[in-house]
Every structure is written in C-alpha cells, then in structure tokens.
Amino acid sequence: MKLTTRGHYSVKALLDLTLHRSRHPVSVHTIAARQGLPPPYLEKLLIELRRAGIVESVRGPQGGYRLAKPADQIFLGQILEAVGEQVDPLPRHSPQADQAEDWVTFAVWNRLSQKLKEALYSISLEDLYFDARSWQAAQGDDVSFMV
C-alpha cells in the first residue's frame, strides 16, 4: 500500500485540526498555510471528508472546518477511504487450483492483507497526533506543529 498525495494531505489537514481542538472552525487558507498545502486541492479533500462525516463545515466570514467527532473516533482507514485511497493494502491474488504452494502463498498474503487492513482501522487520528507530538519532542522542536 502506498499513501498518495491525497491521503497524505488529508491526514496533515486533520492533524492540524486536531492540534487546534477549539470548536471554532478553521479556514482552508489557515490550514493550507500552516501545513504548506495548496488551498484549492485541500478544499476538495475537505469536501470529501465532510461527505464522509469526518469534518463539518461552517459557512460565513468566521467559517471553516472542524472535526465532526473526537479524534479518537476517527480512524486512518476511514480517512483514506473518504478521499478515495485504496484500503486493501496488498494486491489481489487468485491461486491456481493445481498448485499447493500457490494456495499457501494465497493464504499467507490474504491473512497479511486482512491484518494490515485491521491496522488501518485501528489507528486513530488521536494516535497519529500523539505520535507526531512525541517525534517532535524527540527532535527538540518547539510547540509549532507541522506534519
């Protein structure tokens, strides 16, 4: 499985919203500036995340986006799926009926794929947030936050 720009930018934007946990919405331009993302592309991703119920939008001069639910209830698999990422981490394989080793290979890859998919749906946005904060602290970074 490869995390594309869509998935990477989506996670960065959501981590930014997690850092700024206030109930006040954050504008696309503010998130984009803090994370170094192109605003028009980010807007499209946030619309997809809104449709999936991950963020909510508020219109008006003080509008923007905020998380629709707590970060510990938003999972990496949901985020990736919302922006059209493939959540099946391994390619599909169909074993040949007459080759036992092909069935063994199929069984191994099938189980690995299932475990990886389970992992994607068990890693919360909050987990990623604390991992990023721990890494920054280990690097000696100050309180600024850029993923």
Image (tube, helix red, strand yellow):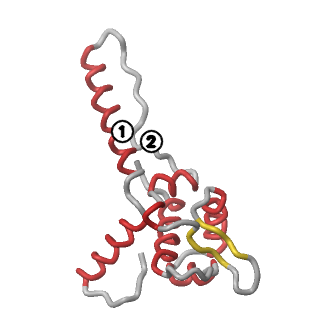
Is residue 95 positioned above or below 68 on the image? above
Is residue 88 positioned above or below 139 on the image? above
Mark 1: which amino acid? Ser
State if disc 2 and disc 1 touch (CB < 8 Å).
yes
Q: Residue at x 28, y 76 (%)?
A: 134
Residue 94: give x, y in percent of width and height: 41, 22
Label whose residue precedes the other's in the sequence (1 or 2): 2
Instruction: Judge by depth and name the residue closer to the eye, 73 or 93.
Output: 73
Inter-mark Cα distance, 1 to 2:
7 Å
Q: Residue at x 25, y 87 (%)?
A: 140
Q: Quadrant of the C terminus?
A: bottom left
Q: Is residue 30 left or right of residue 3?
A: right
Residue 74: give x, y in percent of width and height: 48, 60
Residue that label 1 marks: 113
Residue that label 2 marks: 88
- Which residue appears farthest toward the bottom when viewing the image? 142
Instruction: Judge by depth and name the residue closer to the eye, 72 or 48.
Output: 72
Q: Quadrant of residue 24?
A: bottom right
Residue 58: give x, y in percent of width and height: 70, 75
Q: Residue at x 27, y 30 (%)?
A: 108
Looking at the rendered structure, the secondary structure element under dot 1 is: helix
Q: Is residue 25 left or right of residue 35?
A: right
Looking at the rendered structure, the secondary structure element under dot 2 is: loop
- How many C-alpha atoms fall within 10 Å of the one at disc 1: few (<14), some, or many (≥20)? some
Instruction: Judge by depth and name the residue closer to the eye, 69 or 92.
Output: 69
Mark 2: which amino acid? Asp
- Which residue appears farthest toward the top when viewing the image? 98
Q: Residue at x 32, y 9 (%)?
A: 98
